[in-house]
Amino acid sequence: MEVGRNITVIPARKRVGNTIKAQEKPKLRVAAYCRVSTDSDEQATSYEAQVEHYTQFIQKNSEWELAGIFADDGISGTNTKKRGEFNRMIEECMAGNIDMLITKSISRFARNTLDCLKFIRELKEKNIPVFFEKENINTMDSKGEVLLTIMASLAQQESQSLSQNVKLGLQYRYQNGEVQVNHNRFLGYTKDEDRNLVIDPVEAEVVKRIYYEYLEGASLEQIGKSLEGDGIITAAGKARWRSETLKKILQNEKYIGDALLQKTYTVDFLTKKRVKNNGIVPQYYVENSHEAIIPRDLYMQVQEEMIRRANLHSGENRKKRVYSSKYALSSIVYCPKCGDIYRRIAWNNRGKHSIVWRCVSRVEHGPSKCDAPTIEETDLQNAVVKAINIAIGNRDSMIKALQKNIETVLNQGDETSVENIHAKLESLQRELLKRANAKKDYNDIADEIYRFRELKHNALVEDVEKRGSKKRLEDMAAFLNEQSTSFDEYDEQLIRRLIGKIMVFEDRFMVEFKSGIEIDVEM
């Protein structure tokens, strides 16, 4: 006799969340999530109101028990990476400690469609519904996900629109020259009670020290070690000074009282990714926007020195960067045969130990590449001292020549050229804004602005070069006036102050002072 199969249907038990109790109807552990987008006073009040609202909303339902209020205050909702409370809430759900979530709206939960749907599906797998109060959507309903997809998409569009509005607001402030700086990480400045940028006297001295040490020949690494040795911390409160941090300080136009606005821009409103602005969106250069710490001519001398050091190359095809600040003669001694620099070397020649300077091309490729002579360090130092003493011995004629050169420098160029260019730029800027507001084409005006900005830059560079030449001539004249006796010993600091370049010939040294004076010294 064939035995029939018995099939017993076990009906699904209606279940919400992670709670299962057979004997009694369990209370649902309900948590709420709330968030406001900025840290303004008005929205901070909204944040507190949301917390109070959901605490009462959950507690007054006899079938619910409060499983927590999770609140992110002052954080954007376009992604979930920085929303600590949101992420903690999801972890609690996954751990089985929450049965249901309540939030005000989809835009409060997430403005990114992919994020929103991702988390809701993860929660559905755990039988945890999310109730959106404003839209009256329960994600466990049959219609929930269809409605949710539509609503989340709309929320994403709303977020994009908000992002565009923020950009327009920034553009308007930029056009009016309103400078926004995070002064908490800006060495040398703080803000007063009216939120204006003002100098911090103690930090300003550190900025000046960095600029002056750089011009005196120190490398970025040496400046960093010097600051660390004196226990001076960075604007971010760190003990270690990175070379990149010091380079940014030396290149920051805000230290001369100017501000270049919109150096970077946001390429994706969801990821908030910012990239360097290479002309994709407008930039605004505001002159004299705040009090300067560094004089303009000093700032431009630093930029000039940075370019000089960056262009010091050696070796095959001049690919190797060679600037060194360890010794005063580093990077200023040249070979006239191949144009490469001389390098300081501890030499062991047939058991004889000595310090010599040798052409880098000869060191790396042998005499077939360059047969420039090897120079004893003492001979090189003595030649420089002798050149300085020759200048002191001819003080009167030297000073007359220097004064004549200073007058020549002062008479060079058109004094009003920068002012004329600036006036033209202002006129073009007004016309650009007029056309932009009228939604007319302004490409021709934009091209003219770029052309005149380049003209202004070149004129400023010429002006700085003229001031630099004048200062170097004045420094040399001041030295000759103050020096009454000749020098007996080599002085590193004096060499850094006076000497610009040394050429090593077969029979002589050509010593060029920073003032431009050249003196030959026999080998």
Image (cartoon, grey):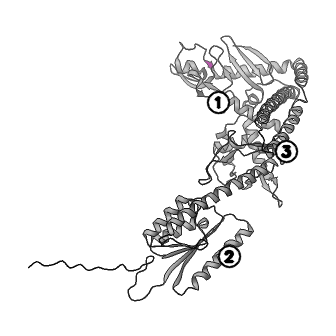
Q: How far apart are marks 1 and 3 (CA)?
A: 34 Å
CA gap between label 1 and label 2 equals 62 Å
Q: What residue type is labelled 2?
A: Ala
Q: Identify the magenta region.
A: 371-375
Q: Marks 3 and 2, Cα distance to the nearest angstrom?
A: 44 Å
Residue 372 within the magenta-colored segment of the rendering: yes
Quadrant in which the C terminus is drawn = top right
Instruction: Specify the amino acid type for callout 1.
Output: Tyr
Q: Which residue is drawn at 75% across and 40% down?
A: 211
Q: Is there a contact, CB below 8 Å, between mark 1 and mark 2?
A: no
Q: Residues within 10 Å of mark 2 (few under 14, many from 20)?
A: few
Indicate the position of residue 484 as horizontal and vertical percent values.
Answer: 87, 26
Identify residue type, mark 3.
Asn
At which x and y percent is residue 37?
A: 66, 64
Q: Which of marks 1 and 2 is in front?
A: 2
Where 302 falls versus 257 (above or below)? above
Among numbered discs 1 and 2, the one appearing first in the sequence: 2
The picture places residue 486, in percent across and down from the top left corner, at 81, 23
The residue indicated by pointer 1 is 323
Which mark lies nearer to you, 1 or 3? Answer: 3
Q: Name the residue under label 3.
A: 288
For the point 63% across and 13% down, the residue is 337
Left or right placement of residue 128 versus residue 200 in this view: left
Left or right: 177, with 167 as reference point: right
